[in-house]
Image (cartoon, helix red, strand yellow):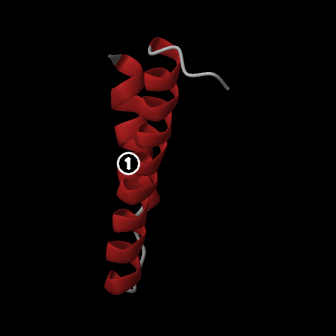
Amino acid sequence: MGTLSHFRNLYTEAFQGCKPALAVIFLKAYSVFAAFMIFMAIYAFTERVLTGFQF
């Protein structure tokens, strides 16, 4: 649990002091999108492994 809070602190500190608010909003949305895409890739890989898909 400490690792997640550390990552949360790094995430919030990364955007402190950024002046163009539009850039901050874009970067935050992009980071959520990238995390979602990584999650989908991991899900697809594990689904194929568990169902016996022939690679």
The N terminus is located in which quarter? top left
Name the kind of residue labelled 1 in the image. Answer: Phe
For the residue pair 23 and 31, the one nearer the viewer reads as 31
Residue 16 visible to an observer of this rendering: no
* Residue drawn where x is 35% and y is 55% of the image: 32
Q: Residue furthest right?
A: 55
- Classed neighbour count for the residue bearing mark 1: other residues with Cα under 10 Å, few (<14), some (14–19), many (≥20): few
Q: In which quarter of the image is residue 29?
A: bottom left
Tally of numbered discs: 1
For the residue pair 14 and 36, the one nearer the viewer reads as 36
Q: In x, y percent, where is residue 39? A: 42, 38
* Residue drawn where x is 32% and y is 82% of the image: 21
8 is higher (above) or lower (below) than 31: above
The C terminus is located in which quarter? top right
Q: In which quarter of the image is residue 31?
A: bottom left
Q: Residue furthest front?
A: 54
